[in-house]
Image (cartoon, rainbow, N blue to C red):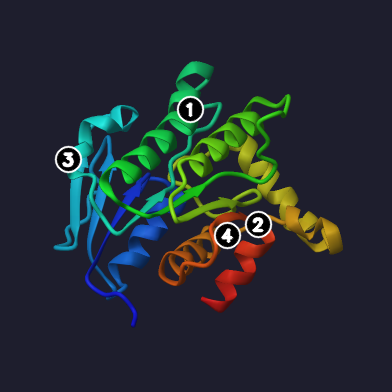
Amino acid sequence: MEQRNKTAIIIGATGLTGGQLLNSLLSDNRYQKIKLFSRTSIGINSDKIEEFLGDVIDLENFALDFTADEVFCCIGTTKSKTPDKEMYRKIDYGIPKKAVKLCKANGIDTFLVISALGANPKSKVFYNRLKGEMENEVMATGLNHTYILQPSLISGKRNEWRFGEWVVKQLFKIFNLLLLGPLKKYQSIHPDEIVKCMIWLANNKPIAGRISSEKIKKLAKNA
């Protein structure tokens, strides 16, 4: 029987993918409450939403309120927003690490986090290495239903305009037509596909593991 009246936690609901996830969960009658942990209010008035405002780098301070059926971690920053590597690490590695440990401590067995294509703890590229280290930390926690999504470049319109990212996205509109066969996994992906995949995973609970960008698209079509 499908579970109803669930509570979900979203970390990173003010971002592109997290915002779309929030909108989807608000219209999903399986979810009764959505807890948001962030620095600033999302600015949406809904009886479903419960906001906990503060610095999520210190997520452990929210331990008593960190209770739910599922946790969706959509947190992430960029080099332009966070040029300091130490602070970058506290966000992209530290927040998911603290979130999954709180899940373990509070008996939450479903954790979904957005990583990136190319994540590798041995990579010489800082971003890929950091994502790889984060993935290993999350998987080592041993939650029954842990899903790490590894999307390629995420398309879609953000609140803030990033020139470099905009240029890459324009190029990917062309490259997507050429990226076929084994290169198909590098095609850009829309946040709506990621959201549909995350919700499907949370409610169907297949074997835990890493979900490639190509598989995200396939699961989204079936969602």
Q: Earlier in the sequence, mark 3 or mark 1?
A: 3
Residue at x 66%, y 50% (from the top left corner)? 152
The numbered dot on residue 60 is: none
Write down the residue under mark 2: 213
Residue at x 57%, y 54% (from the top left corner)? 209
Of labels 4 and 3, the one closer to you: 3
Residue 87 quadrant: top left
In percent of width and height, residue 26 lies at 28, 66
Circle 1/circle 4 CB separation < 8 Å: no
Write down the residue under mark 3: 64
Q: Earlier in the sequence, mark 2 or mark 1?
A: 1
Circle 3/circle 1 CB separation < 8 Å: no
Q: Is residue 9 above or below residue 58?
A: below
Q: Earlier in the sequence, mark 1 or mark 4?
A: 1
Which amino acid, mark 2?
A: Ser
Circle 2/circle 1 CB separation < 8 Å: no
Q: CA–CA distance between discs 3 and 1? A: 30 Å
The numbered dot on residue 81 is: 1
Which amino acid, mark 4?
A: His
Quadrant in the picture for the N terminus: bottom left
Q: CA–CA distance between discs 2 and 4? A: 10 Å
Residue density around tag 2, few if under 14, some if 14–19, many if 20 or more, within 10 Å: many
In percent of width and height, residue 37 lies at 27, 42
Residue at x 67%, y 55% (from the top left corner)? 188
Of labels 3 and 1, the one closer to you: 3
Under circle 4, the secondary element is loop
